[in-house]
Amino acid sequence: MLYQYFILFFWSLVAATFFPVSSEVFLAGMIQQNSKIIILSAVIVATIGNVIGGIITFYMGWKGGDIALKKMSEKNIKRYQKAEKIVNKYGTYSMALSWVPFIGDFIVLFGGIFKLSIIPSIIWMTIGKFLRYLVFALSVAGLLDYFLI
């Protein structure tokens, strides 16, 4: 079972970069396949991997954002514009939205490009990613209903 946590970590890290993979699919399979899994430990492992992947993306923006923007495809221009507005408006708080599909990676990239404060950015990124994984895992396990009125 330990190998599943390593795969979850790796998949979560890769999912936070620009590679089109979904860590949620593996997490869901892990939870459904293994009744002995401790949901919180899986959520923490996924969050750590995803945050490290986010830090890599943030660093890419910090060091090479201008190059990335010049090579951006037209397909990504709308995502770029949405992400840019969000980062300009909310600053480091916008990193809490790093989990959002399609624009989350761009938000993190722009956080790096705009040289947002690193520690607050990582904190907000961690909060957003942790809450996303927690809600997702509880939902998959059928436990979310206990927390809703």
Image: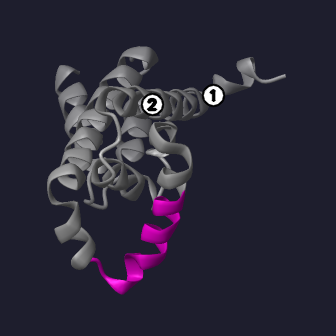
Q: Earlier in the sequence, mark 1 or mark 2?
A: 2
Question: Which residue, as the protein is rendered here, is positioned at the far bottom?
Answer: 74
Q: Position of residue 78 (x, y in %)?
A: 48, 76
- Residue segment shown in magenta: 72-85
Decide which of 104, 140 is in the foreground and name it.
104
- For the image shown, how many numbered marks are present on the structure? 2
In the displayed structure, would residue 53 be above or below residue 73? above
User: Which part of the image, by quadrant, shows the N terminus?
Assistant: top left
Q: Residues within 10 Å of mark 2 (few under 14, many from 20)?
A: some
Q: Position of residue 107 (x, y in %)?
A: 42, 53
Secondary element at tag 2: helix
Q: Amino acid at mark 2?
A: Trp
Q: Residues within 10 Å of mark 1 (few under 14, many from 20)?
A: few
Label 1 belongs to which residue? 142
Label 2 belongs to which residue? 124
Give the distance between the C-alpha atoms of the residues marked 1 and 2, in whole angstroms: 27 Å
Secondary element at tag 1: loop
